[in-house]
Amino acid sequence: MSDARIHTWTVGYVTTIWGVVEMSLNTPEEIEEFRAGPEAFYARRHSATVEQYRAWIDTDGRPRCAGHTRKGNRCANPISGPARDLAVHARLDRSEYCAIHGGPESTTDRR
Ligand SMILES: [Zn+2]
């Protein structure tokens, strides 16, 4: 039996800050791209780099302060609550300063 119209359909799974998501891979090129790097694939689909994707995961989506500590390390304080969207996080991360580094009052409470 042959049927040229068989629907081939592939999905890939990527970890996000709210769980694992299913991404449909619609072309051989997409399947290849996904196999080469699921994180890079997800990042590209959300207008971000792999580094920005990893920062999003590492911070649970909380964009970080653009300042530095007295020792010269990057400040780890969040400047806002979690961004569910990678592209939003990528835009906000390291873009503003926390209250300690002269930014507006932090919107993150410390419950
Ligand atoms: Zn800071």
Image (cartoon, rainbow, N blue to C red):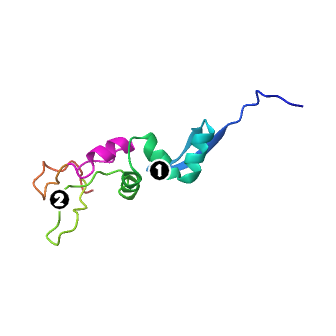
| 3 versus 27 height, above or below | above
The residues tagged by marks 1 and 2 sit, at their Cα atoms, a distance apart of 27 Å
Viewer-proximal residue among 30 and 9: 30
Q: Residue furthest left?
A: 102
Of the two numbered discs 1 and 2 on the same chain, state the one appearing first in sequence. 1
Q: Which amino acid does label 2 sit on?
A: Gly
Q: Does the residue labelled 2 lie within 8 Å of ligand 1?
A: yes
Q: What residue type is labelled 1?
A: Ala
Q: Residue furthest right?
A: 1
Quadrant where the image shows the C terminus: bottom left
Is residue 51 on the magenta stretch? no
For this view, does 103 lie left or right of residue 88? left
Percent position of residue 64, x then y: 26, 54
| 10 versus 111 height, above or below | above
**Residue under the point 25% across and 61% down:** 76
Residue bearing the label numbered 2: 67
**Residue under the point 14% across and 49% down:** 105
| 9 versus 100 height, above or below | above
Query: Which of the labelled discs sits on residue 27, or is there none?
Result: none
Residue bearing the label numbered 1: 40
Quadrant where the image shows the N terminus: top right
The answer, for residue 84, to whether it is visible in the render is: no
For this view, does 93 lie left or right of residue 7? left
Percent position of residue 57, x then y: 41, 55
Instruction: Please give the range of residues in magenta.
Output: 79-95
Residues packed near mark 2 inside 10 Å, few (<14), some (14 to 19) or many (20 plus): many
